[in-house]
Amino acid sequence: MLMNSNYLEELNEAQLKAVVDFNSPSLIVAGAGSGKTRVLTYRIAHLLHNNVPPYKILALTFTNKAAKEMRDRISQLVEPEKARSIWMGTFHSIFARILRYEAEYIGYDKNFTIYDTTDSQNLIKAIVKERQLNSKDYRANLIHGKISRAKNNLVTPRIYASNSELINHDNMNRIGETYMIYEIYQNRCRTSNAMDFDDLLLNMNILIRDNPEILKKYQNKFSYILVDEYQDTNFSQYRIIRQLSELHRNICVVGDDSQSIYAFRGARIENILNFQSDYPDYKVFKLEQNYRSTQTIVQAANSLIAKNTMQLPKTIYSKNDYGSAITISEAITENDEAFKVAEYIMSDSSELEMPYSEIAVLYRNNSQSRIFEEAFRRRNIPYRIYGGITFYQRKEIKDCIAYFRMVVNPNDDQALLRVINYPARGIGKNTVERIESVALSLNVSIWQVISSDIVNKINIQSGIVSRIQKFVDFILELQRVEQEMDAYDCAMHVVRVSGLYQELSEDKTTEGLDRLQNVEELFNGVRDFVAENYNETSDLVRLSDYVENVSLLTDFDKNEKNTNVVSLMTVHASKGLEFKSVYLVGAEESLFPSSMSIGRLKDVEEERRLFYVALTRAKIKVTISWARQRNMYGSLDTRQMSRFVHEIDPEYLVHTSSYSSRTEGTRLKGYSFQKSNGAGFNFDFRKNVNEQKPSLNIFTKQADKNYEGVFIEFATLPIGQKVLHQKFGKGIVESIEDEGTNTKAIINFETGKKTLLLRFARLQLLD
């Protein structure tokens, strides 16, 4: 008996049709904010209302949160017992459940364990070590990623070993033993009665492939199958769904091709685009009314996504108010961008009385968060990083700062334990544990043990003692250097000579590049710290000063009970969420779209879908920001506004600039447009975008180009030159002290005279 017998009255016409027509293959195309979860929930409730037994219903989601939300909603419409009896959960949880029931058919015990990523990578490391392979070539995360992709494409170790294309590719990249590692890895998992997450999908496929009676059993069992976020399914998931639904063909998939953004995880947009060919007798239901956003936001997003060639036809609309135009905020630098966004957010909070919890800052890459974190701290804006950890808690950043802490205070045991054998220098875990035990017994720091004769009295091989002494000498030398260099130069020197940079630069995976970008952002922060704290009474802003400063920053805003915070996250992490006000930052070529996508139509279209997802997170206000200059890999890079901004109908945009107070409701000038071969518009840049990308070397210092409107570093300024500083405002150059790379300028600002190092000052020339 339904607890709410009037539930169908709560649906609009399109939603109602998608709920009540359930005896055929169904594709529900659900635009952003169209009530997708409601339709899926009510369709299941309607099945139960029509006497379909709950155990005959299979509902698959991508997150436990989504499954719980749906089950809770269903419990409000039907008896809770019925809701509990539905086969509802994530792909992995449901298939793990089935595999435990049928474990004997695939050679497993039903009590198998499930390895997480760390378990898998540790096992791979052990195999690489046993086979005496080069761990720098056979990095655990790289090999694990290759094995994962193989499994999700149903490539077993035997198939992998017989595929000449895969083998040749591995040989070219000096990882020709990958197929053998894969085979050993699978055997070890089986011996340990363990599966990883990808095995849950692979083994489910193998189970129903090799055991027709098992396939028939579950085909009969599940009369109705519903799949959420179908555009995010990979090939392995697609094959299972296809097989299980073949008997009854009461398959209902819900998704939005315009929000397919997980190709890097194996998702195939073709699964939803080709639904018609898989099920020719299908019915399509389009949920086109957006209940979330203003008409302006919806129409702007529509004009953007229309440039994609691979999509299902639909017309998303809103009956909400038109609302305000989307603001395109042009900044001079990334620092200017961050502080402008901070000011906008403060305005949202005070003038619009908008809670911080209704505001989000979305970026393409995690490395972009650092500058916004610092800007928010300056303005006392509470925030929280979602979909990751705060910038200063990321491993690569903690590694760098641990070295900085050792230089400043070698008695810091926690810092020492983190860096003594990272990067690897032959001081093993057992050795460190022995030294730590001695230090504890003597009530002294570990440094006091290894830097004195005590280390010679411990039962440690002479060769290892020699390596320890080299580490001690290395830290002592860094302490000497710290007395002679400013914080920026010293920090770069430490990361270079420690081997951290080489370690990071050798990882060419997407994750590896992200980590390297994070380190670059750290140096941008050190650079800014030096610039802001330099004065004529002190010769150097030292690394010790920075370490003290950053130690205070890392403890900021740890009150998890405070929910009234601005959300900072990647666009990927924002999918499924909504906010009243959204700030999409870093809207620049080679950043968004990513430099790795430029040149390939399919990849650019995925980036455009990602941009679309960002826009459609907003209810009433969207601000898109970009910077004309950005520090990239150690040098100041001139930037171009993202093509995606140009692709939005200018009717829905208003531009603001740091160069003037004018606003204009049209596109920015300076770009010439030409028709492309089908993907919307390309624009003719002064330089090829791919040629603009600097070499990935954060230690290559270059003088920035000196022309009007661009920050300068080493150039000699004429006396009397008017300049602009982001912190001190307008000023006039009074004198120059030419000392090479440490050239100083005495500038009379409106707030008083300042002595600045030109290479850090980031001065803008004024007329």
Image: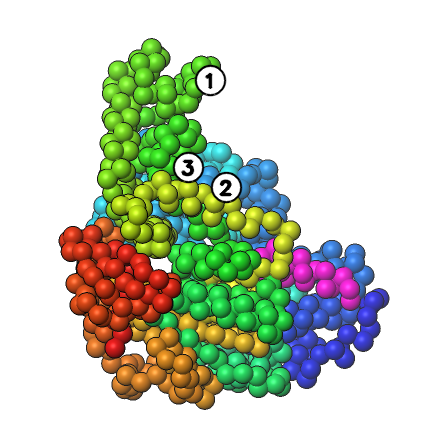
For image coordinates 35% across by 46% down, the residue present is: 143
Q: Nearer the viewer, mark 2 or mark 3?
A: 3
Residue 674 horizontal side relative to residue 350, left or right: left
Picture mark count: 3
Q: Position of residue 713 (x, y in %)?
A: 22, 61
Taking the image as shown, residue 623 lies to the left or right of residue 331, namely right
- Residue at 33% over, 20% down: 450
Spot occupied by residue 9 in the image (x, y as percentages of width and height): 76, 80
Q: Amino acid at mark 3?
A: Asn
Q: Which mark is residue 443?
A: 1
Q: What's the CA distance linking mark 2 and mark 3?
A: 10 Å
Residue at 72% from the left image edge and 60% from the top image edge: 72
Q: Nearer the viewer, residue 601 or 726?
A: 726
Residue 470, placed above or below residue 76: above
Label 2: state its secondary structure: strand
Is 1 situated left or right of 198 in this image? right
Spot occupied by residue 173 in the image (x, y as percentages of width and height): 23, 49
Which span of residues is magenta-colored? 57-77
Would residue 76 be counted in the magenta stretch? yes
Q: Is residue 443 shown above or below 38?
A: above
Instruction: Identify the residue under disc 3.
Output: 122
Query: Is residue 228 at all visible to an observer of this figure?
Result: no
**Nearer the viewer's eye, disc 1 or disc 2?**
1
- Residue type highlighted by circle 1: Asn
Q: Residues within 10 Å of mark 2 (few under 14, many from 20)?
A: some
Residue density around tag 3, few if under 14, some if 14–19, many if 20 or more, within 10 Å: some
| Residue 222, x across and y down, in percent | 65, 61
Label 1 residue SS: loop
Q: Quadrant of residue 336?
A: bottom left
| Residue on which disc 2 sits | 115
Tell me the residue at 40%/81% (across/down): 661
Quarter containing the N terminus: bottom right
